[in-house]
Image (spheres, grey):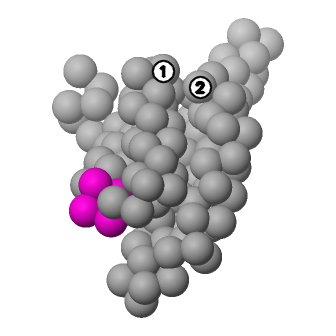
Amino acid sequence: MKRIYISVVIIALVLGASLFEIFYVGSKSDSYTDRIKSIDAVIMEGDRSSALEECKSLESEWNRDAGKIYTLLIHDYIDSIGISISQMRAHLENGNADMYFAESANAKKGLASIKGSEYPYFENIF
């Protein structure tokens, strides 16, 4: 009977950790996507200096959080998002809004991809 209790506890721990990972990655992905969208809106209004400061803040926050996300996901996905965020900042510094929006779209696509990869869909399991 002890084995059954131990098995149930282990299953509960695994399910709890899985749910934590899903919600953590999903909330971080949504948070970063919303921040990128707000930077996009600031650029559309024409305030590039505020957008640049916000983008620098976003990049430093991403660099801090990426280490936590690395433990949960495949590094290539995280690296490509980080590169896109860095490129967004660089394009804003150079005044190239078109390239900024291209990298912004790549970052948002990557964030949506990592969020979708955590859900228990058939293609994610097999």
Instruction: Find residue 82 and report its horizontal and vertical position in percent.
Output: 50, 37
Q: Can the viewer see residue 3 in this picture? A: yes
Instruction: Find residue 9 and report its horizontal and vertical position in percent.
Output: 73, 26
Q: Is residue 12 left or right of residue 49?
A: right
**In this figure, which residue is indicated by the disc labeled 1?**
75
Residue in the image at 28% along x and 54% along y: 99
The number of numbered badges drawn on the structure is 2
Which mark, residue 70? 2
Q: Can the viewer see residue 112 in this picture? A: no
Q: Is residue 74 magenta?
A: no
The mark that comes first in sequence, 2 or 1, is 2
**On screen, residue 19 above or below 6:** below
Q: Is residue 52 left or right of residue 87?
A: right
Q: Which amino acid, by three-letter code, is at mark 2?
A: Tyr
**On screen, residue 16 above or below 13:** below
Name the residue at the bottom extreme.
45
Nearest to the observer: residue 82 or residue 86: 86
Name the residue at the front extreme.
94
Name the residue at the right extreme.
2
Residue in the image at 72% along x and 10% along y: 3
Nearest to the observer: residue 3 or residue 122: 122
Marks 2/1 in contact by CB < 8 Å: the verdict is: yes
**Dot 2: element:** helix
* Quadrant of the frame with the C terminus: top left
Instruction: Find residue 102 and report its horizontal and vertical position in percent.
Output: 25, 55
Residue in the image at 68% along x and 58% along y: 57
Q: What residue range appears in magenta?
A: 97-101
Nearest to the observer: residue 24 or residue 46: 46
Label 1 environment density (alpha carbons within 10 Å; few <14, some 14–19, many ≥20): few
Q: Which amino acid, by three-letter code, is at mark 1?
A: His
